[in-house]
Amino acid sequence: MMLTAIGLMSGTSLDGVDVALIKTDGRRVSALGPSGYRPYTEAERGVLRQALAEAAQLDRRDARPGILAEAERSVTIAHAEAVAAFVAQHGIANDSVDLVGFHGQTVLHRPASKLTVQIGDAQALAKAIRLPVVYDFRAADVAAGGQGAPFVPVYHRALAQSLGREGPVLVVNIGGVSNVTFIDGSDTLIACDTGPGNALLDDFVFRTIGKAFDGEGKLAAQGQVDEAWLAQALQHPFFARPAPKSLDRNDFAALGLGDWSPADGAATLTAFTAGAIAAILPLLPKQPHSVVITGGGARNLTMMRMLRERLAPASVESADALGWSADAMEAQAFGFLAARGLKGLPLSYPATTGVAFPMTGGLLARP
Ligand SMILES: Nc1ncnc2c1ncn2[C@@H]1O[C@H](COP(=O)(O)OP(=O)(O)OP(=O)(O)O)[C@@H](O)[C@H]1O
Ligand SMILES: CC(=O)N[C@H]1[C@@H]2OC[C@@H](O2)[C@@H](O)[C@@H]1O[C@H](C)C(=O)O
């Protein structure tokens, strides 16, 4: 039976809440509905940044010491507001929605210590929006020894299967962290995080010119790549490790940066993201024919140019060019994953998170 789900994603970029409507039975996607976005206010983002810093001390996934309790309330309220505005704007009747997939905000990801923490109170959200909420997608995978990420690959596979492209397809998501899904026919699904996405670049741009991100990659387009720094940074052992592998948003934050001008720094960090994505090619069983770029990074034209240079001869297109939505993809994915979780279908596999066997997940909070 097809279900109507609202998916909600608050990603590692800390930019806001993405919302999307999807009709799915957890295997196929029968329709994609509208999507929306509720940005975090500067004040909310400040609380989240502090929560991420304090979360580094956590050793339990349900503990909310210090600012984490306030951050959780703030995340929950932002999601409730996001849903209320979305259903009002699109005239969606409450009883036409079967379920909501609520990722929450990751504040710490340490799979080696069997710890992944997503904040957001699903029970309070379910009450506020009067809908059943599926949440805690990553916990079961991590508890069973998986990486707990990436989780979007099953959704990428569902989309790619209806694309009808010849040869292997690589879907690259450039959010705060970047991750890839390699799809070769219906049998091969390989996925992992590849390295930095926009987070290092965003943090640098924020520190140097006070902007949240490098719009369209215009700043980077004016700069020179520091090739020596880049070559050194790409020597990090993470890049040579085979999939599955995953990252915390701040895993590369300790990397010493050069004494760059804003433009040179933006160019170098953009090239770092592109270079880290290209570093996955030698680790794949075959070379992809088509590469599809999704996530906010697809709007960064300098990033797209650098990816075309490094991924040739594969074609490199943005998800939007294929009629998918680069912005709504992850929110759609968590609607899809909510339907899968409700049906007990696997959310992760040995080749996507390294979990020992296909693993379902997600808990249900009723209004
Ligand atoms: N117009 C734009 N030009 C350049 N970069 C952009 C643009 N719009 C968004 N971005 C980048 O995309 C980021 C947001 O991406 P996205 O929404 O995919 O992240 P996310 O949901 O936090 O990701 P994830 O959970 O995958 O880490 C912004 O922080 C910014 O760096
Ligand atoms: C632990 C966590 O929240 N990881 C995110 C993060 O942002 C991108 C990358 O790192 C990916 O592994 C994951 O998100 C996407 C939605 C995923 O699980 O596929």
Image (spheres, rainbow, N blue to C red):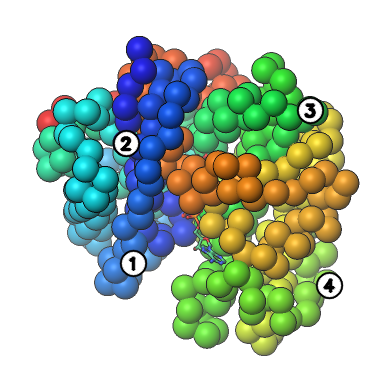
Label whose residue precedes the other's in the sequence (2 or 1): 2
Q: CA distance from mark 1 to mark 3?
A: 42 Å
Residue type at the position of mark 3: Glu
Residue holding disc 3: 166
Q: CA distance from mark 4 to mark 1?
A: 34 Å
Residue holding disc 4: 228
Secondary element type, mark 3: loop
Instruction: Name the side, left or right, on which 175 lies relative to 342.
Output: right
Q: CA distance from mark 2 to mark 4?
A: 46 Å
Q: Name above or below for residue 74 compared with residue 5.
A: below
Name the residue rendered at 82%, 44% in the picture.
Answer: 314
- Pointer 4 local density, CA inside 10 Å: few below 14, some 14–19, many at least 20: few
Q: Position of residue 360 (x, y in %)?
A: 43, 19
Q: CA distance from mark 4 to mark 3?
A: 38 Å
Q: CA distance from mark 2 to mark 1?
A: 23 Å
User: CB of mark 3 within 8 Å of CB of mark 2?
Assistant: no
- Pointer 1 local density, CA inside 10 Å: few below 14, some 14–19, many at least 20: some
Label whose residue precedes the other's in the sequence (1 or 3): 1
Q: Name above or below for residue 343 compared with residue 217.
A: above
Residue holding disc 1: 45
Q: Between 360 and 298, which is closer to the camera in this rendering?
A: 298
Residue type at the position of mark 4: Ala
Name the residue rendered at 63%, 24% in the picture.
Answer: 161
Q: Position of residue 28 (x, y in %)?
A: 49, 20
Label whose residue precedes the other's in the sequence (4 or 1): 1
Query: Which quarter of the picture shows residue 365?
Result: top left
Position of the N terminus, as image quadrant, is top left
Residue lying furthest right? 313
Residue holding disc 2: 6
Q: CA distance from mark 3 to mark 2?
A: 32 Å
